[in-house]
Amino acid sequence: MRNKSSQTDQQPTTCDYRDQQVALLTQHGKEGVIAPVLAKLPGCRVEKVEGFDTDLLGTFTRDIAREGSQLDAARKKARIGMELSGFSIGIASEGSFGTDPFTGMQSWNRELLIWIDDRLGIEIIATSAGKTNCSHRLIESWEEAEDFARSAGFPEHHLVVRPADENYQELRKGLADLASLEDAVCWALDFAPNRRAFIETDMRAFANPTRLENIRLAAEDLARRLTSLCPACGVPGFSRVRLVRGLPCEDCGIPTNEAKADIHCCVRCEHQMLVEREREYASARFCGYCNP
């Protein structure tokens, strides 16, 4: 382990979040998975904040577009929660969906949590990513709707139905039982000029257990970061910010694309530390020379 900071003369301070109140603006049940994690470690009290419709910042059903990036939306929610509650600490969650970064063939969910502490003047970002059931289908019959529902994990995972196509303004969401789903599908098929209905998974947190679990994992990542203090200034959030690649091949010794170390950095004073990984050599299967 090698220290790369020029600020080693700073004296560490202590930061204790035990019993601190933290604002969480949400209307989709996220407090149920975030609060218990942070109550254990680092021991703070996450308080649900109401009084603002978070759907105004963007919806997954595309009726309201999200402005800015995923981080921008999370930061805005955290700030609104802090203003409504009067707390100096706020937390917010924001999700995004796309294809997996490995094959580009599976649905992928990335959850981001932001922690803002105005007392210390810091922001800490935590994430979690994994496969999800985010999907949709254009259907022509109730039988096709039933088939999609089975593949999507219905009724534990709720569904959304709209007439004609994915852009039709009228919709029914939060469908969580067979009777309401059938009624919505029949309505959409009868209402649509093309006699088709667009059915998709409801990706709001409370309506999607798979996504809710990913939010919980992001909360665990945040808890680890909150208990990792900077060795120079003592604030939380000291964690890995990038990889150092070039681990030598076990056979020929040529540098590979495998990581040989991590760079950890403070979110406030920018103190950095190079942390060597335990592995000394990479497998020859990752070597561009031995395994071209």
Image (tube, rainbow, N blue to C red):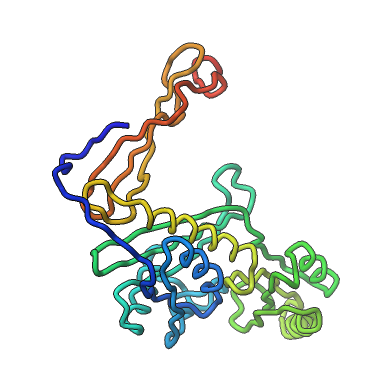
Identity of the residue furthest to the bottom in this view: 51
Tell me how many marks there are.
0
**Residue sitting at x 33%, y 72%:** 89
Image point 43% across, 20% down: which residue? 248
Up the image or down, 60 lies above or below 248; here it is: below
Can you tell which quarter of the image residue 211 is in? bottom right
Residue 204 located left or right of residue 245: right
Residue farthest along the right direction in this orientation: 143
- Residue shown at 82% from the left, 66% from the top: 147
- Viewer-closest of 47 and 27: 47
User: Which image quadrant is residue 175 in?
Assistant: bottom right
Farthest top residue in view: 252
Place of residue 136 in the rendered image (x, y in percent of width and height, measured from the top left): 68, 65
Query: Could you say which is closer to the camera, residue 217 or residue 192?
Result: 217
Indicate left or right for 125 with 149 as reference. left
**Can you say whether 257 is above or below 183 in the image?**
above
Residue at 58% in and 54% down: 108
In the rendering, at what x and y percent does residue 100 appear? Answer: 58, 49
The quarter of the rendered structure image containing the N terminus is top left
Question: Where residue 43 appears, x then y in whole percent?
Answer: 43, 66
Measured from the top left, where is residue 224 in percent x and y? 43, 54
From the viewer's perspective, tell me whether residue 183 is left or right of residue 289: right
